[in-house]
Image (cartoon, rainbow, N blue to C red):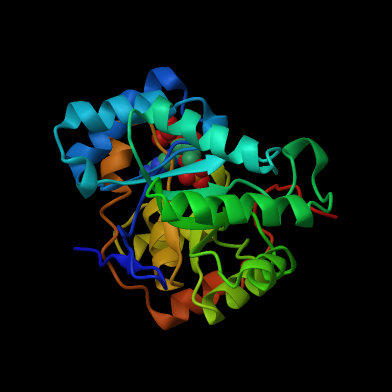
Amino acid sequence: MLKDFVTYDGVSVPAVGLGTWQSAPADCYNAVRWALDAGYRHIDTAHAYGNEADVGRAVRDSGIPREQVFITTKLPSHIKDEKGTERHLTESLRNLGMDYVDLYLIHAPWPWSEIGKDCTEGNIVAWRTMLDLQIRGFIRCCGVSNFLPTDIKPLLEATGTMPAVNQIRYFIGNTQRETTFYCQENGILVEAYSPLATGNILDNDVLAEIAARYNASVAQLCIAYCLHKGTLPLPKSVNKARIEQNLAVDFALSESDVALLDGMDGIGPFRKLRS
Ligand code: A2P
């Protein structure tokens, strides 16, 4: 049984969450049902994914009490004002059919259409608004996504409150060392989205060789690596068998294999989010 993570403000977060980025609404419902049947108690969605309603319906239909499932959703990246933040959370809750979310994240420090733009002031406004919505009971835990330390520090300076979570793109060969170190030093839980590199490193021969030592698949190795590093993996799948497989990762990697994996910087064909 995998141990929950706990945020600095004392909220338990189940150790592997189902990612739903790029899960079409038509597939998302079944994926969440299968995940809950398999034992997942953590589902990650976003307003921008267009599948919040399917996530909510699947949770309800599962019959599992709402408070036993950890639900994350996200404020769209271009919303950086008070009214917009309130309106989008309200909309997400309506989509989900829920009266609170467990974790609400600023999806990115800048609009996806303007990567790298300085939106510090807007992020502070959104962050203050989220903290207020948390006090009002609509959010259990507030966090950010795709933030660098330089994006996080102004939030702390302005409000005195640190994000509980930073959800970043994190997989073997792409571990954003500086950001991960800063977050973990400051008690911010790092969640790993795209822990399988959106599928792009699963045919890597070195990874296959290491995975074989544990009778595991490369996907399982990727997930186990995140856990070893103290990051919370959010593997996405819409396939029942793969969803089940991605939760069966309760094995310990040897230090020598971790050292090998740590040295695999740059595998996979990826563009940088910032220049
Ligand atoms: P599918 O949804 O058809 O299972 P990431 O979590 O990094 O975003 O990766 C998601 C990609 O990896 C999707 O293409 C998903 O396809 C695939 N995937 C998820 N789990 C596994 C697995 N256990 N084995 C192989 N591919 C997987």
Residue 242 relative to residue 185: left or right? left
Farthest residue, direction top: 26
Q: How many dots with numbers?
A: 0
Residue at left 62%, top 76%? Answer: 182
Between 219 and 51, the one nearer to me in the picture: 51
Against 209, residue 198 (above or below) is above
Between 211 and 137, the one nearer to me in the picture: 137
Residue at left 33%, top 34%? Answer: 98
The quarter of the displayed image where residue 58 is located: top left
Residue at left 74%, top 40%? Answer: 111
Between 214 and 165, the one nearer to me in the picture: 165
Against 9, residue 185 (above or below) is below
Against 256, residue 263 (above or below) is above
Tell me where residue 269 appears, x and y as whole percent. Answer: 70, 47
Tell me where residue 161 appears, x and y as whole percent. Answer: 56, 69
Q: The N terminus lies in which quarter of the figure?
A: bottom left
The quarter of the displayed image where residue 95 is located: top left
Tell me where residue 21 appears, x and y as whole percent. Answer: 51, 36
- For residue 28, say whether it is visible: no
Tell me where residue 274 appears, x and y as whole percent. Answer: 80, 53
Quadrant where ligand 1 appears: top left
Residue 132 relative to residue 125: left or right? left
Residue at left 83%, top 53%? Answer: 118
- For residue 213, say whether it is visible: yes
The quarter of the displayed image where residue 153 is located: bottom right
Q: The C terminus lies in which quarter of the figure?
A: bottom right
